[in-house]
Image (cartoon, helix red, strand yellow):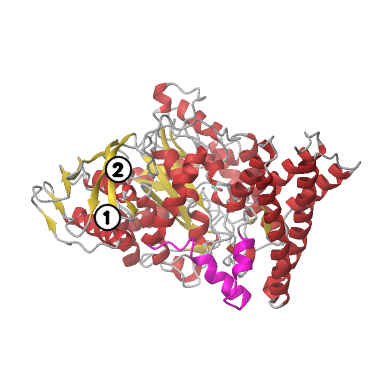
Amino acid sequence: MRTPKLLTAVLLLNIVPTVCAQSTAGAAPQHHLLPVPASVRIEPGRLPIDKSFTVAVTQHRDARLLRGVARALLRLKARTGVEFSHEIKKDAAAATFTIQVSGPGEAVQSIAENESYSLRVAAQQATLKAATVVGALRGLETFLQLVERDASGAFLPLADIADQPRFPWRGLLIDVCRHWQPVEVIKRNLDAMAAVKLNVFHWHLSADQGFRIESRRFPKLHEFGSDGLYYTQEQVRDVVAYARDRGIRVVPEFDMPGHSTSWFVGDARYATAPGPYAIIREFGVFDATFDPTREEVYRFLDKFIGEMKSLFPDAYWHIGGDEVKSKQWDSSPAIAAFKKRRGLKDNEALQAWFNQRLSRILQKHNKRMVGWDEIFHSDLPKDTVVQSWRGQKSLGEGAKQGFHGILSAGYYLDAMQTSAFHYAVDPLPASSDLDPAAAGRILGGEVCMWGELITPENIDSRIWPRSAAIAERLWSPRSVADVSDMYRRLGRVSLQLEEVGLRHLSGPDAMLRRLAGTSDIEPLRELLRLVEPLSLGQRQRARRATQLTPLTTLGDIASPDAPARRDFSALVGAFLLDSSRDPGKRQALSREFQRWRELAAEIARLAASSPQLQDAAGVAATLTELAATGEEAVSFIGEGKTPPDGWTAAKLALLDRAAAPQGLVRFAVIPALRELVTSAGGSHPAAP
Ligand code: ACM
């Protein structure tokens, strides 16, 4: 879906991140909490977690809360290796950890749900207090993140935390249409969302490439639109209940009037053109559109929504509304006549007409409408939520006109940007010109995991841990913006996310073993520290993938935000800053380049034995050149020599070539190498 070129432009032009290098104040003991709580004080001292550890839930005790506590205890036991009682006592007196919750919270979680909690860890006892079960669930995650270990055992640092979210809408969209994602993938991602306090699962259930939910009233939808890959209604109920157990709302998206081919494969009556239609295997924007001029279309949508609403208790309903192609509407004389009759001057006005009809149907079913930027129109009810994917500007404009908004521009994971990039994107930046009333209409943001390039095998490593950085942006105060501190905490949280079932760290190894046909994958693992997957746009230009393409190559396995992007930059930075020319820093870089050369040779050998690894041969050749370039730059700088004429220009040109896609990956080390080459080309103090 989407126009990657436009998206890239939006990302580059509208929201160039401002990386704020504010340092952590004072010398208070460090914590690893992510998101950082609204208020947190860590004090010297500890509360040990040993065999005598017990937990009590003393006031409100409902099944949802007790399940949440039981899950937390299992994770605590696995993490600490301590065998303690599973009994959830009622009496605080003897408990190490007391949980006091005032009541259940809302029967259907809304954007107004109270998610606040306080957590006090004293030397004898920890106490978690919350008004609602959801608040307690948030506090339990903080409790688990606080756990530390050292040679003397597991413990909590003494702490005083009072916490609440900055934004009420903190979402993750998963597109299950372009590639199918079974229930277990959704569930483990819900667990991961809860671990970082995300609270809306946006389930993108229909697109040109798939209609992914069972309709009993209109069974041709899933029978013809899904290749048999759809959720039964029982599975949907199960997922919605699973999400509620974790304090997560589920907002379904049924994209219309465009992106709608799969609806019409079994029955084309409601489409603008008669068809026939087939499930689309390509990615992009296609012709199929609902016909907005016929009453039976609205009768159908009324019945469809009437059926589906029993599965989705949330107050909000996403109608999509993005990227409507005009071809079918423009070639229909009936539509031309309709537009003329109603005074609708263009297709945008026609879509606005459609949305108003849809909005009335949703109102009848007690649902509030959410849609992408394109639905924005002054005639819609003011409780409509505009989800902004085309830029932050439209979010602000909507809010000024009285609409609620959520930001997704800048949170597109398929752009394969770094965590730091996404972290810098703020739904309400300090520079915002919105007055307090309009600012209050910005409900938050949503991470978008579009489905073109994801399978159940690699989806976790695209979503995580980057989404945790965005989760912090949406939960924590705006002033929490220290990028290196975020990465420090993200590293820890990333490990913990595998405790809840994610495979973002372990999954790539299994894929590499299959790719290489051997368990000797160490060289490939090392290579994946240096390279990243291509953005969706780059990938489609390099080698166009469809729904039928196996997503099993290096580029599908490599993770965004490769470790070397920061590790190698740090080595280069330390070397360049070191005016005393400490030989240790030079040696560290030389060792790195030497390793690249060896690696290149090992990869070339592996590539020769696997047809699927052919790309790797080219990557290895480039890596050899990069190693040589780095080596030369380091010796010029280290020896205080000026490179010969033309060296710098030639090497920068080489780096430009190396920055382009190599097969289906790109090198993450180019910016730091560029810095090295540019510095070598300048003047240097001679080595002592
Ligand atoms: C979108 O990316 N078309 C919402």
| Residue located 54% across and 57% down the image | 271
Q: Which mark is residue 16?
A: none
Foreground residue among 114 and 667: 667
Q: Within 10 Å of the Cα at label 1, are there few (<14), some (14-19), or many (20+) other Cα atoms?
A: many
User: Quadrant of residue 404 in the image?
Assistant: top left
Q: Is residue 250 visible?
A: no
Q: Position of residue 153 (x, y in %)?
A: 29, 56
Extreme residue toward the right, this view: 645
Report the amino acid beneath label 2: Ser
As helix, strand or loop, the secondary structure at mark 2 comes to loop
Instruction: Estimate the spatial distance between the alpha carbons at disc 2 and disc 1, rounded to whole Å.
Output: 14 Å
Q: Which residues are magenta?
A: 501-528
| Residue located 60% across and 71% down the image | 521
Give the residue number, with chain letter if any, for mark 1.
245
Foreground residue among 216 and 23: 23
Disc 1 C-beta below 8 A from ligand 1: no
Foreground residue among 571 and 101: 571
Report the amino acid beneath label 1: Asp
Q: How many marks?
A: 2
Give the residue number, with chain letter if any, for mark 2.
110
Q: Position of residue 58 (x, y in %)?
A: 11, 48
**Quarter of the figure with the N terminus:** bottom right
Is 168 on the left or on the right of 616, as rendered?
A: left
Q: Is residue 44 magenta?
A: no
User: Quadrant of residue 275 in the image?
Assistant: bottom right
Q: Position of residue 583 (x, y in %)?
A: 69, 45
User: Quadrant of residue 437 in the image?
Assistant: top left
| Residue located 60% across and 68% down the image | 522
